[in-house]
Image: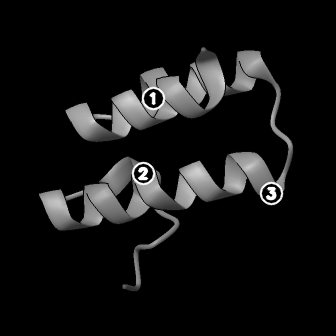
C-alpha cells in the first residue's frame, strides 16, 4: 500500500475502502471538528457505506 496517504490518486474500490476506514478512525483519534469532517466527506468519501458510516458516527 505505497499510496496509502496519497488521497488524490485513489484507484480501485479496495483502496477507496481502506482510505475511508482510515479516515473514520483518524477523525475520532484526532478529535477533528465538524467543519473539517464535512470537508473530508465531500473530498474523500465515495462509497455509500462509507458515507453512511461517516454521517452516523460524526454528523448526526
From the viewer's perspective, is residue 19 above or below residue 34? below
**Front label number (2 vs 1):** 2
- Residue at x 40% of width, y 74% of height: 3
* Cα gap from disc 3 to disc 1, whole angstroms: 20 Å
Residue 6 on image: x %, y %: 46, 62
Toward which corner of the image does residue 51 lie, by quadrant?
top left
State which tag comes first along the sequence, 3 or 1.
3
Residue 42 on image: x %, y %: 44, 21
Label 1 Cα crowd, 10 Å radius (few <14 / some 14-19 / many 20+): few
Residue 1 on image: x %, y %: 36, 85
Q: Is the C-beta separation of discs 3 and 1 under 8 Å? A: no
According to the image, label 1 marks what residue? 43
* Cα gap from disc 2 to disc 3, whole angstroms: 14 Å
According to the image, label 2 marks what residue? 20
- Residue at x 64% of width, y 28% of height: 58
According to the image, label 3 marks what residue? 29
Amino acid at each position: 500500500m505505497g499510496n496509502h496517504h496519497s488521497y488524490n490518486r485513489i484507484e480501485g474500490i479496495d483502496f477507496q475502502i481502506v482510505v475511508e476506514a482510515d479516515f473514520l478512525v483518524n477523525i475520532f483519534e484526532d478529535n477533528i471538528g465538524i467543519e473539517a469532517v464535512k470537508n473530508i466527506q465531500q473530498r474523500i468519501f465515495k462509497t455509500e457505506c462509507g458515507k453512511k458510516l461517516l454521517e452516523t458516527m460524526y454528523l448526526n
